[in-house]
């Protein structure tokens, strides 16, 4: 009988997204096939890494990512990264696990770093010929010319931290008087921000993953926020309509899925990735690439998995099988 793989679910993280990470981790924990995997939750928070077993905590040895349990060394074969934000989504953990030669579920450290920074990712995708919103980049300490920004991008516009998720620090700015305070708020989450021009249209998102040797696009979700945009309340507190499959044409569906799979391949991504789009006058504009998307019960990818009629345990098994090499 083949030995079960020892799977760590990396949860928590050092950012404001810790709460969301724990929900994602719990979904993964609940659905991993216990016939194939020995599963241990590992809470990582500001340098304190603990394996959680039966309400007991065991210190992780960072030299080899192991821990002592009942007098024996427990070594992990694989890590399912469920940390949104640093250090699980920005490439830090990926580089660490590469050094230890432990496979994991997300894109590698280059892909993670690139997609985590909205400005760098958008700039690269634009150079590769994809449609993205017009944007302006500012580092903390640089002078800010509000008139020039508005002349370039128009109003309304969106102010975003470059490296933050779950819509933390994002503002929709409708008037010049509100721009400076929105910029100040974004700088509370990151040392570099981007300001994007507004794109009218339908907001949609598509999960992409590799199953065996095939890149698969999940059914598309259409997002209709009750507020100004798809903010934290819309994402996690039910303040939006999320329609799967999206109410768009077959041609639009095929084009969004084609682009999503193409980007997944060109950026050498791995595991489950979610790519957000705005359909503007029938043209898909890429909003963001999420290398470690939320997997909580209320998150978008699980909705898409259910719409595809894929059992969640099979979905996670497919991801592990495709990334454990």
Image: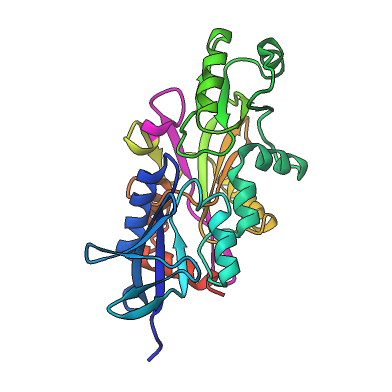
In the figure, residue 39 lies in which quadrant?
bottom left
Q: Is residue 324 above or below residue 119?
A: below
Q: Position of residue 154 (x, y in %)?
A: 65, 16
In magenta segment, residue 220: yes
Q: Is residue 289 above or below residue 73?
A: above
Q: Is residue 77 above or below residue 285?
A: below
Which residue sits at x=32%, y=35%? 238
Q: Nearer the viewer, residue 255 or 215?
A: 215
Q: Farthest residue toward the top?
A: 177
Q: Is residue 211 visible?
A: yes
In magenta segment, residue 224: yes
State the extent of the magenta-drawn residues as a range.
208-234
Q: Is residue 260 visible?
A: no
Q: How many discs appear?
A: 0
Which residue sits at x=40%, y=33%? 232
Q: Is residue 317 above or below residue 116?
A: below
Q: Farthest residue toward the bottom?
A: 1
Q: Position of residue 153 (x, y in %)?
A: 67, 19
Q: Position of residue 294 (x, y in %)?
A: 42, 48
Q: Position of residue 68 (x, y in %)?
A: 35, 74
Q: Which of the colour schemes (rainbow, by chain, secondary structure, one colour) is used?
A: rainbow
Q: Is residue 109 left or right of residue 28?
A: right
Q: Nearer the viewer, residue 180 or 2?
A: 180
Q: Nearer the viewer, residue 74 or 162?
A: 74
Which residue sits at x=57%, y=75%? 325
Q: Farthest residue toward the left?
A: 55
Which residue sits at x=57%, y=34%? 278
Q: Nearer the viewer, residue 19 or 273?
A: 19
Q: Is residue 72 left or right of residue 180?
A: left
Locate the N terminus and report the quarter of the image it occupies: bottom left
């Amino acid at each position: 009988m083949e030995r079960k793989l020892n799977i760590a679910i990396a949860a928590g993280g050092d950012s404001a997204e810790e709460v969301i990470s724990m929900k994602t981790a719990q979904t993964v924990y609940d659905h991993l096939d216990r016939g194939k995997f020995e599963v241990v939750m590992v809470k990582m928070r500001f340098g304190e890494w603990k394996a959680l077993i039966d309400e007991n905590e065991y210190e992780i040895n960072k030299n080899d990512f192991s821990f002592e349990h009942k007098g024996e060394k427990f070594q992990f074969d694989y890590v399912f990264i469920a940390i949104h934000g640093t250090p699980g989504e920005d490439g830090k953990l990926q580089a660490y696990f590469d050094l230890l030669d432990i496979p994991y579920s997300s894109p590698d450290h280059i892909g993670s770093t690139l997609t985590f920074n909205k400005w760098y990712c958008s700039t690269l995708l634009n150079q590769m010929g994809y449609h993205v919103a017009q944007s302006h980049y500012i580092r903390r300490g640089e002078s800010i010319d509000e008139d020039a920004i508005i002349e370039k991008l128009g109003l309304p516009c969106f102010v975003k931290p470059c490296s933050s998720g779950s819509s933390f620090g994002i503002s929709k700015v409708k008037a010049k008087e509100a721009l400076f305070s929105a910029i100040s708020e974004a700088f509370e989450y990151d040392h570099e921000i981007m300001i994007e021009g507004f794109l009218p249209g339908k907001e949609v998102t598509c999960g992409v993953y590799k199953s065996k040797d095939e890149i698969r696009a999940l059914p598309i979700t259409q997002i209709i926020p009750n507020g100004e945009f798809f903010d934290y309340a819309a994402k996690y507190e039910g303040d939006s309509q999320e329609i799967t499959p999206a109410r768009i044409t077959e041609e639009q569906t095929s084009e969004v899925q084609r682009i999503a799979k193409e980007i997944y391949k060109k950026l050498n991504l791995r595991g489950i990735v979610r790519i957000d789009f705005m359909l503007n006058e029938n043209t898909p504009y890429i909003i963001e690439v999420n290398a470690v998307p939320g997997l909580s019960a209320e998150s978008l990818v699980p909705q898409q998995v259910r719409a595809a009629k894929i059992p969640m345990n099979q979905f996670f098994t497919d991801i592990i099988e495709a990334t454990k090499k």
